[in-house]
Image: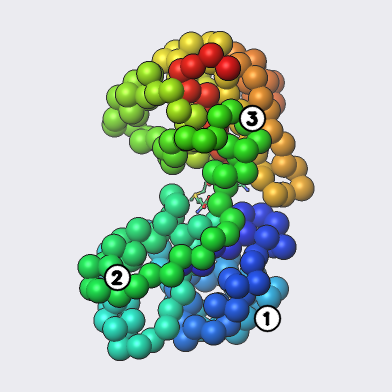
Amino acid sequence: MVPTPIGNLSDMTFRAVEVLKAVDLILAEDTRTSGVLLKHYQIDTQMNSFHAHNEHRQTEGVIQRLKEGVRMALISDAGTPGISDPGYLLAKAALDAGLQIEALPGPTALIPAVIKSGFPNNRFVFEGFLPLKKGRSTRIKSLKDEIRTMIFYESPHRLLKTLIQFEEYFGSERKVSVSRELTKKFEETINGTLIEVRVHFESRPAKGEFVIVLAGNIDL
Ligand code: SAM
């Protein structure tokens, strides 16, 4: 499991490059996106596609080939495989088959976002993407009394709607931190109460990739 940069190509680790050069095959979420990264680091290992739409179908075959001794690395479009990206099913199947997994440490969006929030980070909850429709309110409601810092991934076109929903369930004065475009040219982090941050994004169209970090139900 090899993490790749979430924007800034220099965030690739030396070990990630070494592993991607050494394996027989790279399984990539999108071979075109990853092609840019591999070219940058002069990695010419063969790539096969492995994404959310074919991971169920492919997993068995991949496990079989791993058992035969083919060395493979899994990468996603950005960040750590398995973190809101394909990877979990393959990790589980590999363990079930008695294989060992190596998971390299490296880029992921949630960690810089939680650090930049300034909220307690000795304990936190990663919620990933909220359900789009069914179960969305129930999920948010279930977090009402959560005292740990909460981290959500969100798409730009749903950001404002989510902040409004959060105000409804957590109250306008709850503290929030929204990080966008982490490690990229237009990186910024907006910290404030839910009402302040919501007003901020009402006057600016949300562009890029976002992480929402919500303070727990405690006095900060
Ligand atoms: N595997 C990735 C990771 O380890 O963070 C997450 C992939 S998930 C499909 C994509 C979501 O991650 C985006 O919608 C956004 O919420 C978050 N994300 C990824 N890169 C980001 C960045 N550079 N800045 C802010 N959020 C980012």
What percent of the width, then of the height, locates residue 93?
A: 26, 67
First reached walking from the N terminus: tag 2 or tag 1: 1
Secondary element at image label 2: helix
Marks 2 and 1 close (CB-CB < 8 Å):
no
Tell me the distance, in whole angstroms, between the alpha carbons under discs 1 and 3: 38 Å
Q: Is residue 109 left or right of residue 41?
A: left
Q: Is residue 182 left or right of residue 25?
A: right
What amino acid type should be assigned to the residue bearing mark 1? Gln
Mark 1 or 3: in front is 3
Location of mark 2 (residue): 94
Label 3 within 8 A of ligand 1 by Cβ: no
Location of mark 3 (residue): 118
Residue shown at 58%/82% (left/top)? 21
Rate crowding at label 3 as few (under 14), some (14 to 19) or many (20 or more) other CA atoms within 10 Å: few
- Determine the residue located farthest toward the front in the rendered image: 122
Above or below for 155 versus 6? above
Tell me the distance, in whole angstroms, between the alpha carbons under discs 2 and 1: 29 Å
What amino acid type should be assigned to the residue bearing mark 3? Gly
Q: In this rendering, does residue 41 appear at all?
A: yes
Residue shown at 58%/28% (left/top)? 119
Residue shown at 47%/31% (left/top)? 150
First reached walking from the N terminus: tag 3 or tag 2: 2
Residue shown at 72%/49% (left/top)? 184
Rate crowding at label 2 as few (under 14), some (14 to 19) or many (20 or more) other CA atoms within 10 Å: many
Mark 2 or 1: in front is 2
Above or below for 15 versus 147? below
Above or below for 136 versus 19? above
What percent of the width, then of the height, locates residue 153?
A: 50, 39
Image mark for residue 42: 1
Marks 1 and 3 close (CB-CB < 8 Å):
no
Tell me the distance, in whole angstroms, between the alpha carbons under discs 3 and 2: 37 Å
Q: In this rendering, does residue 198 appear at all?
A: no
